[in-house]
Amino acid sequence: MHAPMNQFRVIDGELVIGGERLSALAARVGQTPFYAYDRSLLRARVAQLREVLPKGVKLHYAMKANPMPAVVGLMAGLVDGIDVASAGELKIALDAGADPSEVSFAGPGKRNAELRQAVASRVLVNVESFREVSELEVISSDLGLPARVAVRVNPDFELKGSGMKMGGGPKQFGVDAEQVPALLADIGRAGLAFEGFHLFAGSQNLRAESICDAQLKSYELAVRLAQDAPLPVKFLNLGGGFGIPYFPGEQRLDLAPIGENLSQLAHRAQNELPDASFVIELGRYLVGEAGVYIARVVDRKVSRGQVFLVIDGGLHHHLSASGNFGQVIRKNYPVMIGNKIGSMPMENASVVGPLCTPLDLLADLMRLPVARVGDLAVVFQSGAYGASASPQGFLGHPACVEVLV
């Protein structure tokens, strides 16, 4: 069984998003398919985290999870900072009113032009190679602005239980921990404005104990590395990794142990890193559960006894839900017929898209209310890595719309 998708209200069997019934919202948008993000749920998630995180721990939004400008604009007013991964994202963040002093720029292959934009914008660059230090030295001299830098460290451990590992072992991300002292020496010689460290061990973890362990190890590694730093550590980004339940058997993350663990680390830091502010960088956890993908049933087919509901959207809009965005063994996202929630009778049905490929499958033999042409299929947990992470030009089908409600 999937974890209950009870973050949205239901009225008379119809899903309610942002205060609007699904059918009315579809009429307002004017077309299907579309993504809808509920701003009240985004606010509630940030408030929930604020209650758990110790005072003084900053909350950053990793906007790669959902770079829709309206979402970034809302989040910029709710969180303490924005983390970007390209010059394109940097522009969106700054246009949304994000404070440059609380914007950080990560990525393993920053181009020279992007580094120049970052320095000119006075945002923090998470350095990921010796090459970046050399280029930043020249750029800083050209612009008359010392680049603000933190070192992204590839730690010597992994985040156990993470869906996607971003550190530990050989990785394209960051600088191996054992090479960081030499990099710090280069930063000092180059006269760059060193501010701290960025450690991101992995993502999509539903085990609080694993996240706590990674945060503890990240903190202790930063304390060791700080001994070679050219300036005191002002910024310590401990990453994120907070997961949300997508698949049967998964449960929501327990935040309480994480908050307690961070409190203990913050207390230690008063003596060991007295100038440092902690940052928690979250993307999926902030926006994932607040979004849904909605597509209309355009055909109902029965092939050798199996029901196929053909919808007007698919993997070209929602690659993750199709299982082609990192899943090894395909599993179903939570899917419902959004205008027939709780309706009877039920049947086993597969929800497929219009693309000419068997990969275009959003629900495989799920128990759903009997649906007809015109009904609205809803994919939950769709607020992160949806539209922007999907091949919308594939096979020439129309792009989808995104709305914040």
Image (cartoon, grey):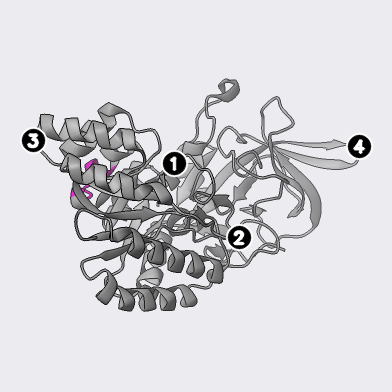
Q: Nearer the viewer, mark 2 or mark 3?
A: 3
Are there few (<14), some (14-19), or many (20+) residues within 10 Å of tag 2?
A: some
Q: Nearer the viewer, mark 1 or mark 2?
A: 2
| Mark 1, residue position | 402
Which comes before the other along the chain, label 2 or label 4? 2
Which comes before the other along the chain, label 3 or label 4? 3
Q: Residue at 74% across / 54% down in the picture?
A: 368
Q: Is residue 95 magenta?
A: yes
In the rendered structure, the answer to whether residue 289 lies left or right of residue 367 reads left
Say if 272 sits above or below 183 in the image.
Answer: below
| Mark 4, residue position | 304
Asked which secondary structure carries label 1, the reply is strand
Rounded to the nearest angstrom, the CA distance separating label 3 from label 4 is: 71 Å
Badge number at residue 186: none
Q: Residue at 51% across / 54% down in the picture?
A: 202
Q: Residue at 52% across / 29% down in the picture?
A: 392
Residue 17: give x, y in percent of width and height. Answer: 48, 56
Q: The disc labelled 2 sits on which kind of residue? A: Gly
In the rendered structure, the answer to whether residue 286 lies left or right of residue 117 reads right
Asked which secondary structure carries label 3, the reply is loop
Which comes before the other along the chain, label 1 or label 2? 2
Rounded to the nearest angstrom, the CA distance separating label 1 from label 4 is: 36 Å
Q: Which residues are magenta?
A: 93-100
| Residue 13 seen | yes
| Mark 3, residue position | 144
Q: Nearer the viewer, mark 3 or mark 1?
A: 3
Rounded to the nearest angstrom, the CA distance separating label 2 from label 4 is: 40 Å
